[in-house]
Amino acid sequence: MKWARGLSSDLVEVIVKGVSTLGIKVLTLIVGLIISVILGQELGPEGVGVFSFVEKITLVAYILAIFGTSEYLMKNVAIHLERDNVEYIKHYIVKVFQIVSLFSVSIFLLFILTINTSFQNYFIQDERIYYPLSVLLACLVFRALLTSPITAFLKGIRKTWQANLFQESLPLILRLFLLVLFVYFLSNNLTVAVVAEIFFYSYLFTFVIALGYSVFIQKRIFREKNYLLAKDLKVKEVLRSSFPFLLVSSMTIMASNIDVIMLGVMIEDLSQVGIYSVASKVALLSNFFLIASNSIIFPKIASYLDQYKLPELEKLIRQVNIGLFIIALLVFVFGYLFGEWLLSIWGDGFSEAHRILIILLGGQAVNIATGCVGGVLMMGGKEKDLSRLLMIMTILNIVLNFIFIHVYGSVGAAIATAICIGLENLIKVYLVYKSFNLSVLPFFKSKY
């Protein structure tokens, strides 16, 4: 291939596999935008604020339910597949399925038992939140199992675009279909409660389809019945190994969602939460190229680190990061010039979030430009270092949000979030250099 001349074979593999994955990401981006616009136009800033607050709370419950097993399973599947130890993979899948099922059901039951006691009295005082929160937590088991073990297993065997289809695109496509059917064909008024029910069915249907596909793939891989002779994994062992991933993922989720949660708690006007959440969603959409490249490159990182092929890994990451830096710059310029017009598509009242969008895009630009540094630390066995960093940054994020929200409101939340995103990713770059002697930014001299 003429276009591949001068590029490493690994980068060519990432690009070729990335075409399908990027297609799925683009589809996800488009469908997600359409859904967000429909919700903005039908629910208004206040309704969007209520549902965004509920969605962020259930996201925290979701991270606790999977308990870091997604990254743990993907890493071990990729490593054992590379070593041709297929018989070990089955054990990882079964144990992760058992753990995630137990945790997700337990979280839902805990919510049901506490909804009329401490949960109601000390955390949530708005009655509009109870029903949609109950519905989204009811589908927690489907959502959690969809991520781990189903899509984690698919990513581990490098069926990346299929995993992204089930984890991201298909639920969104089903939601869009149900939303359009309800609003435009049945001509009903959309409420936050109905949106929650649509989310429930989208996760349920996606889980059933993804489970069937995963079972089909596993039957092709596990044709030999000797996997029962493999090392007997203990639940305690899986939990111990997954716990660092839980810390990393939970701190990451808290860091990226604490702004909306604290706004919902600290500001009585939930319309401000809705306006901020739309700006935040648009800003987060800017890093879908980073997410697409990470989903492809993560199994490669695990394999290279396991074989200690550091020069090849550094070359691959630096080449990918050149493209990501250009994308980050273009996205920020576009948001600065056309952000106000873009936000007006969501309906009346949302265009005032332009200043919030610019601030958040600044933080996301650093996140995109630094590439997969977090993945290198996770796959390289530096989960404890990463978890300590994320814990410190989460505490800093909470403190800064508390201070700036009191002073500047939703704009203050954007300032605090952007500062923490940028600082966190720059520290990750330093940790990768210190731990693996890898110079991942293309502006600095290569170590190999």
Image (cartoon, rainbow, N blue to C red):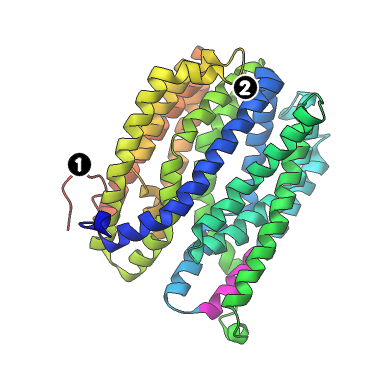
Out of 39 and 152, give the one closest to the viewer: 39
Please tell me which residue is depicted at 17% across the width and 55% down the height of the picture: 447
Please tell me which residue is depicted at 37% across the width and 27% down the height of the picture: 332
Element type where label 1 sits in the image: loop
Position of residue 101 in the picture relative to residue 298 (left or right): right
Q: Tell me the residue that label 1 is attached to.
A: 443
Identify whether 321 is placed above or below 329: below
| x then y, percent, for residue 24 | 52, 48
| x then y, percent, for residue 215 | 66, 69
Please tell me which residue is depicted at 53% across the width and 12% down the height of the picture: 352
Out of 42 and 287, give the one closest to the viewer: 42
Q: Tell me the residue that label 2 is attached to.
A: 274
Q: How many marks?
A: 2
Position of residue 215 in the picture relative to residue 24 (left or right): right
Please tell me which residue is depicted at 44% across the width and 26% down the height of the picture: 360
Identify whether 337 is placed above or below 383: above
Magenta stretch in the rendered image: 86-96
Q: Residues within 10 Å of mark 1 (few under 14, many from 20)?
A: few
Q: Does residue 315 appear in this view?
A: no
Q: Quadrant of the N terminus?
A: bottom left
* Secondary structure that dominates the magenta span: helix
Closer to the N terminus: mark 1 or mark 2? 2
Whole-angstrom CA distance, mark 1 to mark 2, is 39 Å
C-beta proximity under 8 Å, tags 1 and 2: no
